């Protein structure tokens, strides 16, 4: 079956404390709803700095979370000279230290990961698709550079909308774009 | 069977006329042999410029060729704001216009492509592997982000050494590195 595809560019999540450090009293504004309910692109951008380099204009996604997390691609990691692990969002075990810079201040902490390939889903759809007993699936993008992606982790949330997320390395490698479809091979 | 893997970062090939325009009388020096016989990383770098942005420090590969060609990734193309076609090296049909800047001058011409996935091979090995009647193959990289790449074009040259080339989007997407092995699924 085919599902909606989203290509995630590098981005940042912040907890409340770090948001205040970086942006002070400036309110966090929603400029665009994302597909997953409640998630949005905010009006805020930060810079990500390491000893080797700084990447500017990295989007902060909302709402604020219980943890601060920077998600980049392997290509970004070479530019920054770091070696972040591939992780599910929220699992910061072994994450790389980076400095996040905002207009009001900066935060330096281990928080940088490469997000794994993942499929957003809710419990009802997961059961309907027979995915309750498996941790990951395989997906195929058909095009001029057809690619089969294994190791796509199932990310179940109560209100999850069926959507498969790739980072820009995977997505651009097969010339895919956000909003297209990708086939799930279970 | 497994073959050697090479991940190609963005790079440039120049013809003799364009080399003279960009570098004047400075000799082209070989600083590192590549796997394919006679091909090398040179001591020269250029900048690639479009209306949107400039990417600096793009390596010139040697020796000089009969055509000038800039090979970038899809990720690079978004940064540069252009839409180059996926092509076999030397096929500049529909290529994008970019400006190549060197210390002695610059050249603006349609020459920018995204190189297709390809397998270098010589006629003898091609026959031994039973690949004489097919144009492309499939390859599988096994790791933490296992990926199966279809549309890998066979690039036969008289002295070709068996080596599969991916660009940085494909290669970084599956966390692969130059010098590792990738499995050919024929």
Image (tube, coloured by chain):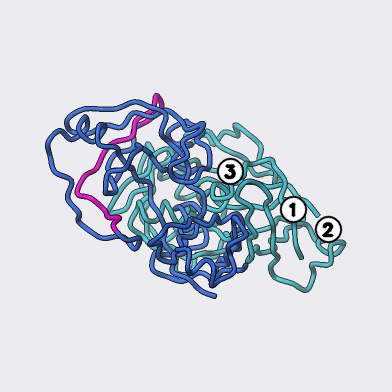
Chain colours: A cyan, B blue
Residue B39: within the magenta? yes
Which circle's residue, 3 or 1, is located before the other in the chain? 3
Which residue position holds label 2?
A125
Which residue position holds label 1?
A160
Which residue position holds label 3?
A62
> Residue B67 occupies which quadrant of the picture?
top left
Residue at the image point whose x is 34% and y is 49% from the top: A49
**Image height check: is A41 above or below A86?**
above
**Image height check: is B59 above or below B136?**
above
Answer whether labels 2 and 1 touch (C-beta < 8 Å): yes
Question: In the image, which residues are magenta?
Answer: B38-53
- Residue A141: percent from left, percent from top: 67, 52
Looking at the image, which is closer to me, A127 or A2?
A2
Q: Mark 3 lies on which chain?
A: A
- Report the disc number at residue B184: none
Looking at the image, which is closer to me, B125 or B164?
B125
**Image height check: is A5 above or below B46?**
below
Image depth: mark 3 or mark 1 in front: 1
């Amino acid at each position: 079956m085919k599902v909606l595809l989203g290509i995630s560019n590098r981005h940042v999540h912040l907890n409340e404390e770090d948001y205040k450090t970086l942006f002070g009293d400036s309110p966090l504004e929603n400029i665009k709803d994302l597909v997953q309910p409640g998630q949005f692109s905010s009006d805020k951008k930060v810079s990500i700095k390491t000893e080797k380099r700084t990447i500017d204009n990295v989007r902060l996604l909302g709402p604020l979370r219980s943890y601060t997390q920077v998600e980049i691609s392997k290509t970004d990691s070479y530019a920054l000279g770091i070696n972040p692990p591939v992780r599910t969002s929220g699992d910061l075990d072994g994450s790389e230290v980076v400095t996040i810079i905002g207009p009001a201040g900066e935060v330096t902490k281990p928080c940088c990961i490469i997000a794994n390939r993942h499929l957003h889903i809710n419990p009802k759809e997961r059961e309907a698709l027979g995915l309750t007993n498996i941790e990951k699936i395989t997906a195929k993008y058909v095009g001029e550079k057809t690619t089969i992606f294994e190791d796509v982790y199932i990310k179940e949330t109560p209100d999850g909308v069926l959507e498969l997320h790739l980072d820009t390395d995977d997505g651009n490698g097969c010339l895919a774009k956000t909003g297209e479809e990708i086939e799930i091979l279970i």
